[in-house]
Amino acid sequence: MALYLIMIIGAAAAIVVGYKVLRLLRLKVPPGPRALPIVGNLYDIKPVVVRCFTEWSQVYGPIFSVYLGSHLNVVVNSAALAKEVLKDNDQQLAYRNRTPQINKVSRNGMDLIWSDYGPHYVRVRKLCTLELFSMKRIDALRPIREDEVTAMVESIFRDCTTNKPADKGVVLREYLGMMAFLHITRLTFGKRFIDSKGMIDEQGKELKYILENAVLKSGTRKSGLAEFLPPWCSFLFNVDSEALAAHNVRIDTFTDKIMEEHILARNNTGNTNNHFVDALLTLKNEYQLSHDSVIALLWNMISAGMDTTAITLEWAMAEIVMSPRVQQKAQEELDRVVGRGRVMTEADIPNLPYLQCVTKECLRLHPPTPLMLPHKASTDVKIGGYHVPKGATVSVNVWAIARDPAVWENPLEFRPERFQEEDVDMKGTDYRLLPFGSGRRICPGAQLAIYLVSSTLGHLLHHFNWTLPWGVKAEDIDMMEQPGMVTYMRTPVRAVPTPRLPADLYKRLVAENV
Ligand code: HEM
């Protein structure tokens, strides 16, 4: 009897093992560069990851595997494969891969960006679509955008007409970064942390400290790599989890204070505002959000909505100063539609089709998140005929797709007219152009970002002529990316602004009580 039992168990075990071996042999993951034990391909990845992956796609094909430590990451590099990921297998590939560090920052995925697809995600996403980013709210927040864009114009005007040596130009990133910071923090927390004289208050200083610290914590390549190695290797990279915990405490203290102020103001006046903090405090119970989730969501908006817009605008201005033809055409349109006797507003954008094409062309050539955010497989799927196992990460190389000569004519040329010849959607229905992603996890801030980018570009071109600093030629501009998940220009671009409107049109349009 015992012998029979042993034979049956043995046969069952052999079937299970045999099945697994056969399955592994039959299920082929995409090809890719040779991975070493423990580190995988980490030793071989070049600092500007998107350029490295684009080169590898030319060697291994439009879909390839890359191992971050022992973690499988599948990278797709064509519009057809992007559709397989973001449409055909959208739900199965809608999880996120959270490294231990991201788990801490996102409070175990109780936010939106790092949450896995599931009941929490669906609830929070619904809140974003119906409430935070509804057209009604985006419209109501328009005065803040116009205030911050005109404040930026005013400071460029002041600097270029007074104290700066004119022929050296201005560093655009300084102005664009400040505008993006003030815009998103005001939208999120409902206050401007810098007064009209440029003085930052104590809360603003703390906010800046938190943001700069966050960049240091998550942006270093060293600690980023350590996340993918087995825990016993982490000592090599000195990942400081105590510092991360202390950082989270500062975030909590800062945000709790802001929330207290809003609750107090609401109790005193009986009014609620349109800022995200007010909206979340009002809707917290209806959407069953914990206190932790509210905090995490507020900070999601800052981290997703600040650098992305500043980066897009800096690349856009670099392309524009290198292309006087495009600049002149956009200015002719602005002069025709807006004239030179008033300032443009967002209401003019629908009547500025060429400006809209300029925005689109910038986002085609320079999507600020060139590999989108990584998606994770919640189950086994097939992409491009290859096996992608449950738990693997899938990245879509939207940068390479938007420069693919198979789908774009002269893809490296900055030519907004291509979108006058063919109207290509950039909000997720055309897989050749995906700066905001597509499908369930598409960027919820896309429309807000498009308004802000188009309006900023419109103002910069309407108010100023932009030329290269004295002695600099277009080919001297460094069009290479800085390493990182979001791709700033490696070298901040300088350009010389020359005012082209009457001096009284350079005043900030202050938005009171918004
Ligand atoms: C030019 C500006 C922007 C670009 C190019 C951009 C692009 C993207 C991309 C590619 C994703 C990932 C999509 C995916 O995983 O499939 C994303 C996600 C996200 N974006 Fe944006 N974004 C921009 C601005 C903004 C702004 C202004 C906000 C908010 C104020 C925002 C909020 C978010 C959030 C919350 C997510 C996470 C969505 C999710 O996981 O479900 N983004 N964005």
Image (cartoon, rainbow, N blue to C red):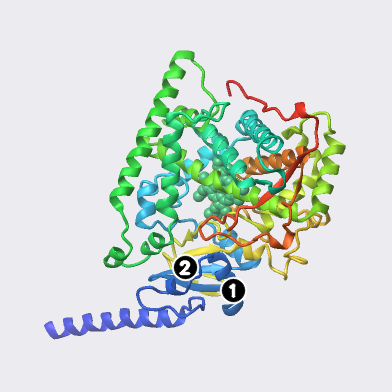
Q: Which residue is mark 2?
A: 73
Residue at 54%, 61% in the rendered image = 89
Marks 1, 2: nearer the viewer: 1
Locate the C terminus and report the quarter of the image it occupies. top right
Note whether 360 is above or below 73 in the view shown.
above
* C-beta proximity under 8 Å, tags 1 and 2: no
In the picture, residue 405 is in which quadrant?
bottom right
For numbered disc 1, what is the local secondary structure? Answer: helix
Q: Position of residue 152 (x, y in %)?
A: 64, 36
**Earlier sequence position, callout 1 versus callout 2:** 1
Q: Position of residue 410 (x, y in %)?
A: 77, 67
In the displayed structure image, the side of residue 218 where residue 75 appears, left or right: right
Locate the N terminus and report the quarter of the image it occupies. bottom left
In the displayed structure image, the side of residue 83 where residue 298 appears, left or right: left
Question: Amino acid type of disc 1?
Answer: Glu
Nearest the eye: 463 or 377: 463
Badge 1 residue CB within 8 Å of ligand 1: no
